[in-house]
Amino acid sequence: MGRQSIAIVAVVAAVSACTSDPEAGFPTAAPAVRDFVSAWNERSEAGMMETFDSEARAVWEDEDLAAWFEGAMEDGLVEDFTVELIGPVDQPSSSEMANDDVVPTAHVPYAVTYRSEAASEPVRLDGEIPVVYERSDEAWRVPWRIEHMWPGIPGGRGFAVTRDYGKRGTLVDRNGRILARGTGPRRRYPAGSTAGSTIGHVERLDRRELAEAAEGHVAGDLVGGSGLEQAFEERLAGRPSMSLFAADLRGRRLKRLGSSSGGNGRTVRTTLDLRVQRAAAAALGDTVGGAVVMDPHNGDLLALVSSSEFNPAFYIGVDELAPFNRALSGLYAPGSSLKVVTAAAALDTKTMKPSSKVTGPGNYRGVRNFESGEFGSIDFATALKFSVNTAFAQVAEKLGARRLNRYMEAFGFNREPAMPLAAARSSFPFPEGEADLMWGSIGQAAVVATPLQMATVAATIANRGRRAEPRITMGQQIAMERVVSPRTAATMTGLMENVVEGGTGQRANLGSVGVAGKTGTAELDAAGEMNHAWFICFAPSDDPKVAVAVVAELGGVGGVVAAPLARGILQSVLPLVR
């Protein structure tokens, strides 16, 4: 009961001024009135209980009284209240006071003023409360009843609030194309299943979810259940028009006390480009996996593609539905696509240069190359070009766990994405030993990443070493962090171009348009027969317009499966963003 700010009314002077003089020898009711009103204003249950008569004290405990107050205030969306005297205390006559067969009763005019979110103006209720003289302890007491909280309203035992939401806001892409519009069961999704798990659906709110729902909702309302519909529920739903009622014990409305006007939901303009989304989804085709297309210069997510998309229109009102968006929430070992971070860290710390010599034996301290390939003595640029695991294991040793971990986190690992749309946290556990360090540096061990995260890795290199935090709405602030120097980013661009032009990523080559990329084959079993196929890239490499990450779940070899998928995405989307 002390949770809300209460305006304390000065009652001492009011009681003294408004109380008639008692007959000589009998105490006035004024002190009891003063103590009762002060305790009520302060919402002190213990203080109120001290002023109650014996019957009220037998009925109420501090905790019960507190629960009643708390429940009533919550039901009425009451923010605070004040209690004040509004007239003189009607003191009983001397004969009544002297008559032992009569319970002397004083009558106190008072008002309770409530300030509720459901009423635009304060609600004042006037009434009269009795104060009885208990001869056993020669003291005035208040025969408290719950209805005293609603003076002037017979049967008043609580509040009820009705809510009426206006039109739900519209979801649009960056160019104003409709993604979702309409209210309640008439919500429509013109794009069908395109970006379905990103757009999300509306579900029917049940009582278990009320505590976490936006203020003003009641069970049965249609609210955002997933995706953007859920992430921007408050903005899309708007503010309801509300009416405050006094209610009886069963919650039936007795009298309207006030009302407040609401507002329709607002349009949410996303960074998605429906044309890019459709093109990227078509390029991914029937592949089980996900893809992300983003603008490397500002973090705008142009497309979030997840296989097995659903059509939100078919699930209006369905609760406990959680569509799985592989682009945002799919956590996969990134495999050698993570070598972009390891290589950038090595160059940025001057641990390596492109010309630095490394060795590529078939096996190095338990780390093996893909298909046990051996490369002998090669330069660092070649080690990235052909994705030589054993060479990178040695580079990781030179970098050390602390520096490698620092760069991984600078590239976005081990942090929650800042955008409102739910996305999984990609993880690079701090290497606890040599094996973790070496295997982690090549995207194995316990490292997991989303396509969203790996797209930001490619985008950071494309953006001259500055990482743009992914954003999903045009109104979200653009946030940039320097991760590596422009020189390191330029060197990495050249090395990643080599991967596509003559290394493991040749199947992503676009010919006349430069592509900088990196393959990844994340091995899930010791035999190397179960692999996630990755490719991350940006293009055109000399003037980047998009960064792309694509993963084929259990798809096989990155250069064979994911690189062609990325090529198809680039071919489809580049004409749309230039």
Image: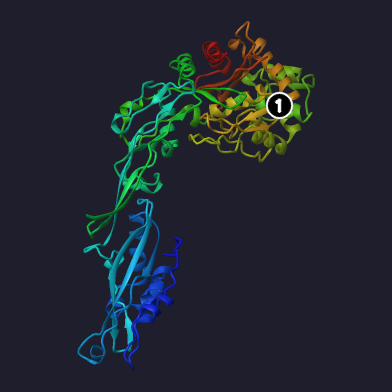
Quadrant of the rendering where the N terminus is positioned: bottom left
Report x, y in % for residue 147: 27, 66
Say left or right for 187 vs 405. Answer: left
| In the image, residue 355 above or below residue 143 | above
Q: Residue at x 44, y 36 (%)?
A: 232
Residue neighbourhood size for the residue with mark 1, other residues' Cα within 10 Å, grouped as few (<14), some (14–19), many (≥20):
many
Q: Residue at x 37, y 57 (%)?
A: 122
Say left or right for 236 vs 404. Answer: left
- Report if residue 175 is visible in the image: yes
- Report if residue 374 is visible in the image: no
Residue that lies at the very extreme toward the bottom in this rendered image = 25
Q: Which residue is mark 1?
A: 344
Quarter of the rendering containing residue 133? bottom left
The foreground one among 254 and 219 is: 254
Report x, y in % for residue 295: 58, 22
Quadrant of the rendering where the C terminus is positioned: top right
Looking at the image, how many numbered discs can be counted on the residues? 1
Say left or right for 434 vs 300. Answer: right
| In the image, residue 198 above or below residue 279 | below
Residue that lies at the very extreme toward the left in this rendered image = 101
Report x, y in % for residue 41: 41, 68
SS for tag 1? Answer: helix
Q: Which color scheme does this rendered protein use?
A: rainbow
Quarter of the rendering containing residue 110? bottom left
Report x, y in % for residue 485: 74, 28
Amino acid identity at mark 1: Ala
